Image (cartoon, rainbow, N blue to C red):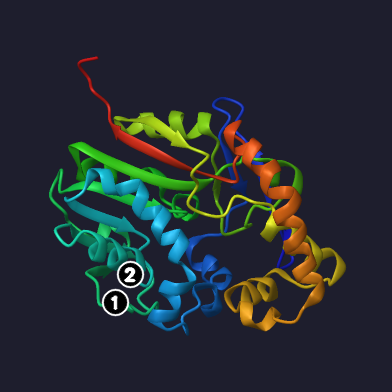
């Protein structure tokens, strides 16, 4: 795939089947692929909660049965999930880590800025650790997972949402976010990967996905990319500012078509394990088994 005049390829390890980006931009070079508009930093906190209401509700549904406890979010961004969780369960103790301190902490949550290995949490500090569409962006993947395994309590749960490279959208439509996505996970490879860190996957949720699992955004993307010939960055800006598309009759027709045709089709794919993204539930491996 050609991005910014650079050629990137997704390759597969012959030994374990793991998919990854090659060549891979280094950490410094990656900064240009995360411009300010990528994080939608100009949004107000009330608007953000309203915009992400369904997503926040889905995220909370993944953790609520384990609450109240100490929760750490990797990739906390503006703090909206921590704030929502705290509203729903005031007894929970929440904190987060994010790399970029230029992202506004809209809800004044306990968010630390830097790489995860910059912080010295005690072993088994957290009963829940969550990462929502973060793992595929991390350069030092092994270092992070060793830390998370150490910070997770013996009865704790690591909940990770990642794109599913086994999905039809990824395999046929080539919708992977290159080069921001450095690794591509399937149900099989994420099980193999976490096992290296004394962890095991005990559940993968395809059906009740956090992020929309319809072809809607992909149809819109293809229309804008192929027919309108827009670049990816402009499409992201429009996604973050949907008010700019009001009155666009063609976009409206695509979304109507999505609701009528692609939603039922995608529901079947989800049941079969071909969802666009998957929520993976991970725990420490019981060595006595």
**Up-down relation of residue 244 to residue 86 (above or below):** below
Residue at 62% from the left image edge and 57% from the top image edge? 177
Please tell me whether mark 1 sits on a helix, a strand or a loop. loop
Label 2 belongs to which residue?
A: 79
Judge the density around disc 2: few (<14), some (14-19), many (≥20) Cα neighbours within 10 Å.
Answer: many
Please tell me whether mark 2 sits on a helix, a strand or a loop. loop
- Residue 130, position as x, y percentages in the image: 33, 51
Q: Is residue 152 left or right of residue 30?
A: left
**Up-down relation of residue 153 to residue 139 (above or below):** above
Q: Earlier in the sequence, mark 1 or mark 2?
A: 2
- Residue 223, position as x, y percentages in the image: 81, 64
**Up-down relation of residue 8 to residue 232 (above or below):** above
Q: Is residue 164 left or right of residue 78?
A: right
Q: Is residue 157 left or right of residue 259?
A: left
Q: Quadrant of the N terminus?
A: bottom right
Residue 114 at least partly seen: no
Residue 264 at least partly seen: yes
In the rendered structure, find residue 163 and report the number of the disc placed on it.
none
Q: 242 and 116: which one is in front?
A: 242
Judge the density around disc 1: few (<14), some (14-19), many (≥20) Cα neighbours within 10 Å.
Answer: some
In the rendered structure, find residue 107 and report the number of the disc placed on it.
1
Q: Quadrant of the C terminus?
A: top left
Q: What is the distance, in whole Å, between disc 1 and disc 2 at their CAs?
A: 6 Å
The answer to which image quadrant residue 37 occupies is bottom right
The answer to which image quadrant residue 221 occupies is bottom right
Residue at 35% from the left image edge and 76% from the top image edge? 101
Q: Are marks 1 and 2 in contact (CB under 8 Å)?
A: yes
Q: 28 and 76: which one is in front?
A: 76
- Residue 261, position as x, y percentages in the image: 75, 49
């Amino acid at each position: 795939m050609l991005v910014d005049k650079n050629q990137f390829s997704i390759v597969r390890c012959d030994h374990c089947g793991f998919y990854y980006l090659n060549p891979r931009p280094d950490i410094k070079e990656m900064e240009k692929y995360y411009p300010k508009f990528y994080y939608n930093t100009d949004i107000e906190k009330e608007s953000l909660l309203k915009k992400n209401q369904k997503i926040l509700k889905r995220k909370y549904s993944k953790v609520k049965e384990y609450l109240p406890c100490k929760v750490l979010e990797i990739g906390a961004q503006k703090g909206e999930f921590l704030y929502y969780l705290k509203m729903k369960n005031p007894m929970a103790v929440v904190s987060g880590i994010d790399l970029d301190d230029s992202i506004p902490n809209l809800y004044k949550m306990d968010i630390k800025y830097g790489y995860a290995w910059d912080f010295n949490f005690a072993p088994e500090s957290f009963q829940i650790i969550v990462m929502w569409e973060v793992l595929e962006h991390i350069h030092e993947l092994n270092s992070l997972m060793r830390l998370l395994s150490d910070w997770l309590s013996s009865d704790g749960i690591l909940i990770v949402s990642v794109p599913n490279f086994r999905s039809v959208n990824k395999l046929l439509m080539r919708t992977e976010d290159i080069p921001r996505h450095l690794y591509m996970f399937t149900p099989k490879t994420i099980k193999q990967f976490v096992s290296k860190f004394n962890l095991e996957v005990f559940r993968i949720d395809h059906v009740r996905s956090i992020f929309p699992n319809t072809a809607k955004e992909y149809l819109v993307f293809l229309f804008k990319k192929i027919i309108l010939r827009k670049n990816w960055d402009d499409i992201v800006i429009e996604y973050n500012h949907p008010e700019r598309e009001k009155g666009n009759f063609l976009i409206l027709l695509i979304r109507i078509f999505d609701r009528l045709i692609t939603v039922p089709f995608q529901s079947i794919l989800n049941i079969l394990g071909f969802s666009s993204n998957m929520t993976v539930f991970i725990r420490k491996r019981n060595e006595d088994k």
